[in-house]
Image: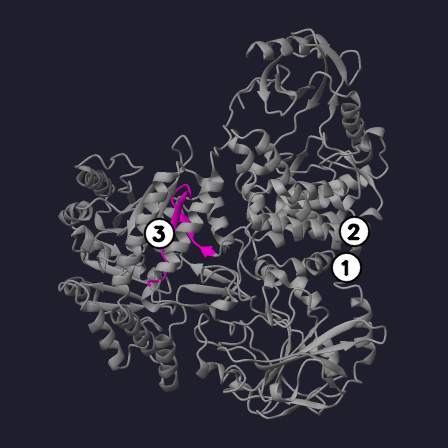
Amino acid sequence: MNDVSEFWAAALRRVWGLDARLSRLDGEYDLNFLVQATNGQDYVLKVMRAGCDSQLVDLQIKALEHIAAEAPGLPFPKVIPGLDGGLLLQIDDDAGRPRLAWLLERLPGRCYAKTVPKSEDLILKLGRVLGATDRALERFSHPGLERPEFKWDLTQAGWIADKLDAVADPDRAALLREICAQFDAVADMLAELPRQAIHNDVNDYNILVEGELSERRQVSGLIDLGDMCAAPRVCELAIAGAYVVLDYPRPERALAALVRGYHAANRLRPQEVDLLWPLLRMRLAVSVVNSTLMATENPDDPYVTISQAPAWRFLEDGSVNGELMSARLRAVCGLPVTDGAERIHAYLAEHRGQFAQLLGQDLSDVPMGSLSVENSTWPQNPFHMPLDEAARVGAEFGDGLWLGYYNEPRLIYAEPAFRKGPWKASDRRTVHLAVDVFAPAGTPLLAPLSGRVEAVENRANHLDYGGVVILHHETPEGDAFYTLYGHLDPEVCDRLKPGDPVAQGAAFARLGDAGQNGGWAPHVHFQLALTTDGMQADWPGVADPDELDLWHAVCPNPAALLNLPDEKVFYRPTDKAEILNKRRAHFGGNLSLTYDDPVMLVRGWKHHLFDEWGRPYLDAYNNVPHVGHAHPRIQAVAADQLKRMNSNTRYLHPAQVEFADKLLSKLPEHLQVCFFVNSGTEANELALRLARAHSGAKGMVTPDHGYHGNTNAAVAISAYKFNKPGGVGQADWVELVEVADDYRGRFKRDDPDRAQKYADLVDDAIAALQRKGHGVAGFIAETFPSVGGQIIPPKGYLPAVYEKIRAAGGVCIADEVQTGLGRLGEYYFGFEHQGASPDIVVLGKPIGNGHPLGVLVTTRDIADSFDNGIEFFSTFGGSTLSCRIGKEVLDIVDDEGLQENARVMGARLMDGLRAIEAEFACVGDVRGMGLFLGVELINPDGSEGTEICRYVKNRMRDHRILIGSEGPKDNILKIRPPLTIEAEDVDMILWALRSVLAEVGDYAPAPVCDHSHHHDGCGCC
């Protein structure tokens, strides 16, 4: 401690009776100390500047006491009395000047500014705390709340209008004048609102947050009431919102979460919600003007202008739709989206059945047709809709009338214009906000009710509306609402103009054909809107599924105008929670689900997957769809063969030998005999039988933490399974050897002889099996151990092992399920990298691209040893369907250059991962080959970062990227996407991983204390 700290430590002992170590904290005018007392508690000592008005401090103390009495659960610090019972004490400082001092409980957590990620869930919780705080302060009064000429009182913010000349940039000055004008426009409304005590400075340094990595974040403290004043409560919310939105990737959603939380605790009125946006912008304007003036006074202080940057970034960001903000915030509060919304809904409900029929006929019995992501495969490629497909959308429903759903998530909105970010897996708009009526081109449309033309246009862009009309309507009370009719014959533009009246039942347009209506199958897109603020004539016809609060309120179900019940046209996707509950009821508890919040996936294409709402995910994990999800050639082959027949290997069929010929062409010449089975598990089980038949022995050697399947025998050679808690344990005929991991194993990469040293570990295993009388039937290993942690053994390891096994009479089995068929880029199989020549090769999962198929390939000698007169037969292994699919997968790898793509994309990914490794201390190792990659995450002490890995995996899922985790301590990220992955997708993985690792920061797991002497302040845990 320095002299100042030591002085106040002595004062602390004298006045509060606490022995403690003091450390200085930041403070603009006052002295602030962190107090670490010997009683094991932490406090904050505040020593006010000389001459400080005692009323200012008394206001804060009284407010804290009031909150503690009214709402003791709120996270505010308690004021600690001195030995004499006083809360605000006068103490002479080391210069003899009287200073006001007070002691506060120190609250846990870190400041919000340094908290990552700032999730919408956390922001919602902050809103709840703010709402509850303001409710608690409603009845608090104190003379210090009235602060005339207080620059941070938002109701007095107009003072900046006379200071704008200090802002040299003319564009910025003009922007600030616009904000001031908008503030002036609402000043009278603001003045009419009731005033109460508010915190008035809930900025990101005055909010404390608890929670590490995967723990749920909680608001653990609100501190520093030094700017308290009396003002309308909406000012509190606007000030907090001004900080919450800064540098947030979706600022409007952050603000909506804050307001939703506040409203849940302290109900807002619509007029208050409407004030939030202009007040929020005005608060930021006050901030930048104030800091500009401070910079003039302190020209050598760069921080003053640097601190403006986030505010300017937000204010100058044109992507936030401020005109739509009131509707957005009203919607999340469940308030009417416009002042007349409830009257409009009542009018539509009352007149349902009385509106003119849109197509001149009753639609009650017209069938519904679903284009949803669950029920439809339009388009084949969810990232591109060719015109020939668009013109045939819904062809399966026939040429007659049919209706398309409102609220239906669809993938037909495939083009980049529907994306809300730079990546294919970015948020996208998928949910239909209208009802479609499909009918022949030329069908006339009749106005459901009278109105006037608001807009009429021909939007001729690819897959746009073609001809489109918007009509303006009013209820008898004068409340305006609007209807939109899209995909019309553009001739309507020659007949109608804005302002034209349209009578109820009048034919005002007709459906266009695909050459006129934007390229679509003929239909009308019929949409209702209660406001056009922020949209004007450019209505979104589809919405982001995560913004349906807003768009359901602005563009509600138009069924009433079609004289239909709402339920007929309202689409309800499968409920994920219901599916999860049924799964738990009907399946075993050890059937695991990935991610803390599981995903429900219903469509796929190449290396992307889609959930029930059409949200896209980049699949960087699933190696089973080797050549990509939903490959058209595999679809075609499967459909073609199922039209013909599907039989087994008891009958001749050319598909069987064609598949064998293709596969054997990729393997060494000594491997000549194929066994077709249903899975890698079955192939490994069969490999054990072949090894034992050929060797006459029983014992097996295998690396630790391997995985070869889920049958009894396969589990017995899978330490990943049998060694887990509750596992069956190691069989007497199995010997484990250490995985050849030259990062974490006993022989490291700086040892040039590590391959031979790891291979030599097999000697003891062989000896043990021979000693127990089992002999050596063989050695089985994942060529590159995958569940062991994406390990690449040092070159030369497998040949040395194979030599020892063969010398003992055993058979060498290469499990290539994870690594074979071109995934490694440079090599078609992993054993090629090793320079090894296995006796048996096992293939599974990827060779069928999702179809259940496994293959064992071996030598003629071993096959002959197994041919003991007992028939080998697998009912579906080697079926005609399976053989055609298996060969097609191999052909696609060749025809589409996917092995080369694995090499190029793998190198791009590896280069990026190594750059990340150099940047983040929690990345201990990056390893792999082609598209078989692992990232080992570690704690600061070098131990396995299991919690870090879990956090990263779940946060990558939040970024719409699916990756896995493996390793004995589950601390290794596993990246093994379908071989179709592209450069854009690699860059997304690297961008997201860098962002997530930055959130990890300096995390270290809490030390485990084995002491039995816990006492206050022991410091050991």
SS at mark 2 in the image:
loop
Residue interval drawn in magenta: 961-979
531 sits to left or right of 631: right
Q: Is residue 207 above or below residue 35?
A: below
Rendering quarter of residue 605? bottom left
> Does residue 743 show up?
yes
Q: Residue beneath label 3, please?
A: 707
Q: Is residue 315 above or below residue 441?
A: above
Rendering quarter of residue 208? top right
Coloring scheme of the render?
Answer: one colour
Tag 1: amino acid: Leu
The Cα–Cα distance between marks 3 and 2, rounded to whole angstroms, is 58 Å
Asked if residue 673 lies in the magenta stretch, the reply is no
Kindly identify the residue that appears in the image at 19 percent across and 50 percent down. Answer: 834
Q: Residue beneath label 2, please?
A: 268
Marks 1 and 2 close (CB-CB < 8 Å): yes
Q: Specify the quadrant that holds the C terminus.
A: top right
Q: Is residue 1012 above or below residue 559?
A: above
SS at mark 1 in the image:
loop
Mark nearer the N terminus (3 vs 1): 1
468 sits to left or right of 845: right
Mark nearer the N terminus (1 vs 2): 2
Q: Residue beneath label 1, please?
A: 335
Q: Is residue 589 above or below residue 236?
A: below
